[in-house]
Image (cartoon, grey):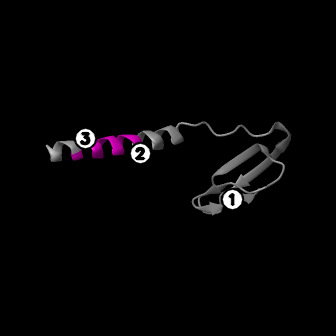
Amino acid sequence: MLRVLLGIAFGWVIWKVLSGIIRMLAVEPEAPDPDDVVPTEEHFRCIVCGSEATVTLRSATEAVAPRHCREEMQQA
């Protein structure tokens, strides 16, 4: 009888912990402030494989180059 009660108690604790984790992951991230996004026309090229990317919108506060092949891309 004690084993059954302990099994039910552990199952309930595991259920509560996992449902809380899933609930935290289901929350949508905040939308960016429209004033912090500025239009731009920047072209980047990966120095490892040569892939190219064009950035049309970027953050006004931080101008970080995109990453590809685990390296920062260089402006073309």
Name which residue type carries label 1.
Met
Residue 14 part of the magenta segment: yes
Marks 2 and 3 in Cβ contact (< 8 Å): no
Q: CA distance from mark 2 to mark 3?
A: 14 Å
Where does the image place residue 72, in percent across and percent down from the top left? Answer: 67, 61
Name which residue type carries label 3.
Ile
Q: Secondary structure at mark 3?
A: helix
Q: CA distance from mark 1 to mark 3?
A: 54 Å
Region rendered in magenta:
6-17
Where does the image place residue 33, in percent across and percent down from the top left? Answer: 79, 39
Quadrant into which the N terminus falls: top left
Q: Quadrant of residue 67?
A: bottom right
Residue located at (73% from left, 53% from top)? 44
The residue carrying mark 1 is 73
Question: Is residue 24 something that shows in the picture?
Answer: yes
Question: Quick one: label 2 or label 1, which is nearer the N terminus?
Answer: 2
Q: Secondary structure at mark 2?
A: helix
Marks 2 and 1 in Cβ contact (< 8 Å): no
Mark 2 against mark 3, which lies toward the viewer?
3
Picture disc at residue 8: 3
Q: Is residue 68 above or below residue 3?
A: below
Where does the image place residue 22, in percent across and percent down from the top left? Answer: 46, 40
Q: Is residue 1 above or below residue 69?
A: above
Q: Residues within 10 Å of mark 2 (few under 14, many from 20)?
A: few
Picture disc at residue 17: 2
Q: Is residue 3 above or below residue 70?
A: above
**Most extreme residue toward the left, as rendered?**
1
Q: CA distance from mark 2 to mark 1?
A: 41 Å
Quadrant into which the C terminus falls: bottom right
Q: Residues within 10 Å of mark 3 (few under 14, many from 20)?
A: few
12 relative position to 28: left or right: left
Question: Quick one: label 2 or label 3, which is nearer the N terminus?
Answer: 3
